Amino acid sequence: MNKKLIGVAMLTAALLIGGCSSTLSQVSGEGTTEEPIFPNPDKVTFNNDQGTFPNIESLRTVKAGMTKDQLYYLLGRPHFQEGLFGVREWDYLFHFHRMSNGKNEVVTCQFKVLFDKHYVAQSFFMRPVGEPNELCSLDKPAKVQQFNLEADGLFDFDKSGVRDLKPKGIEKLQNLAKELAQNDNIRSIDIVGYTDPLGGVIYNQRLSARRAHTVMQYLGSLGVPMDLMEASGAGPTSEFAQCDRSMPRESLIACFEPNRRVTVGVKRLGADTMAQ
């Protein structure tokens, strides 16, 4: 009786292993295929059958030669029923935010990884779910357009609130919001505040962060999607202007003016750089 049970168990295990090692695509020993076959996106099982919004920087780090553990750390476990043994094909369902015609949209892409016979990643494929778009492409790197806004043109000296915005600063931000609304495929907007080196480091760090958050808040009030923006403070800097500390204070403040700024980095994928 025990021998029969053992035999049945071994046969069942063999069938399971055989079934779990199958792949959708015909994957060579080198981890390549002539025709990648993607699973039905409706069959996704990860995150309550929804897929995920990946970390963009982690996705950019992915490259050939990585192990499964390294990919698992960067992207998480695969999103479909890949199996348990001998798997050389991982599939993901990723969602990305983008700004199109001044509105926030969500684009969905399928991402596939193929492994060689040693289970090392070698090939990557990506395709859109639905209409073609430039986000679901591995061939078009992200491009960054940076806007430099002098803080003295935005705020009074040592000020940072929305009510402290100068008329010229408001005009600059309104023009920037219009510029953003006219461009598609915006993936993220990184807003960073800087101060001059006068004053304490901790105070300047907080001041730079408040200014960046004020710019983000104001752009949001003009229709720029908040979930595309991140704001942070870089604190004091002398990168843009170095001045003689022996100068009179008013002259020193004027000399350091280029260091008091807010930068807005607009990251887009696969499109021409925006004009300033």
Image (cartoon, rainbow, N blue to C red):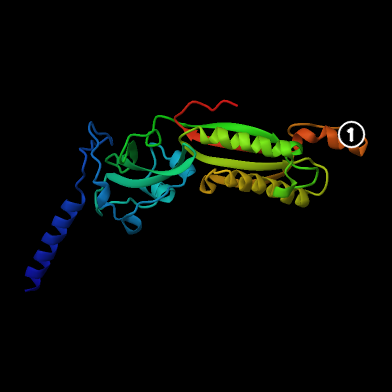
In the rendered image of this protein, does residue 180 appear above or below residue 40?
above
Other-residue count near label 1 (Cα within 10 Å), few / some / many at <14 / 14–19 / ≥20: some
Element assignment for label 1: helix
210 vs 237, nearest the viewer: 210
Tell whether 190 sits left or right of 101: right
Tell whether 45 sits left or right of 215: left
Q: Residue at x 37, y 44 (%)?
A: 67
- Quarter location, residue 37: top left
Q: Residue furthest bottom?
A: 1
Res. 261 in view: no
- Residue 164, image x, y percentages: 75, 47
- Residue 4, image x, y percentages: 6, 69
Q: Residue at x 55, y 40 (%)?
A: 189
In the rendered image of this protein, does residue 78 appear above or below residue 178?
below
Viewport quadrant of the C terminus: top right
- The tally of labels here is 1
The amino acid at mark 1 is: Ser
- Residue 106, image x, y percentages: 41, 45
Pointer 1 residue: 251
- Residue 246, image x, y percentages: 92, 35
Res. 118 in view: yes
215 vs 52, nearest the viewer: 215
Tell whether 203 sits left or right of 20: right
Viewport quadrant of the N terminus: bottom left
Tell whether 162 sits left or right of 6: right
